[in-house]
Image (tube, grey):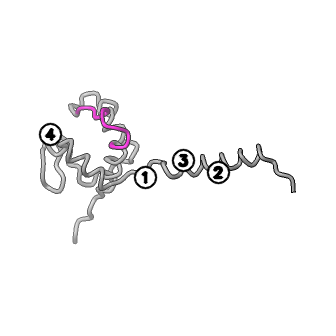
Amino acid sequence: MRLNLPGQIATVSLVFACAVTVAFASPKPSASAGQKVLEANHCTMCHSLKGVGGKIGPDLAGVGSRRKPDWIAKQIEDPKSHNAKSIMPSFAQLSKREREDLVAYLSTLKEVPASR
């Protein structure tokens, strides 16, 4: 049996690179981490949630039913893109991970059907 050392080294290197990429890849956005981002950034100073919080911005209850994640992400980063007169500040300074987690959390806030 003849060894093809350069080819075998390249194959091992490729397999190692793939394994490292998978091992250190960013985890999926976390709704629980997103709730912490919401709390840390005092979003409920302006927005209400579960009947608690401010009245300046819209109630966040059910936002996950009313808006798609892409819309929520854009609103967090650039509120004036949806409404030029918006007084909501941009939260573009949050890390990408924090914004993704916040979107994941807000997307879980679904409209609760009215009981009959």
Residue under label 3, please give it. Answer: 21
Residue 93, image x, y percentages: 30, 32
Q: Position of residue 57 (x, y in %)?
A: 18, 41
> Mark 2 belongs to which amino acid?
Val
Whether residue 35 is visible, yes or no, is yes
**Magenta region's main secondary structure?**
loop
Pick whichever, 73 or 83, lies toward us. Answer: 73
Q: Which mark is residue 28?
A: 1
Tell me the residue at 43%/52% (across/down): 27
Q: In what element is the residue under mark 4?
A: loop
Res. 65 visible in picture: no
The residue identified by callout 2 is 15
Name the amino acid type tagged 1.
Lys
Which tag is nearer the camera, tag 3 or tag 1?
Answer: 3
Q: How many marks?
A: 4
Q: Could you tell me which secondary element the residue under label 3 belongs to? A: helix
Q: Amino acid at mark 4?
A: Ile
Q: Which residue is mark 4?
A: 56
Whichever of labels 2 and 3 marks the residue nearer the N terminus, that label is 2
Q: Earlier in the sequence, mark 2 or mark 4?
A: 2
Q: CA distance from mark 3 to mark 1?
A: 15 Å
Give the Cα distance between marks 2 and 3: 10 Å
Task: Judge whether 21 appears above or below 75 on screen.
Answer: below
Q: Are marks 3 and 1 in contact (CB under 8 Å)?
A: no
Relative image position of residue 37 (x, y in whole percent): 26, 46
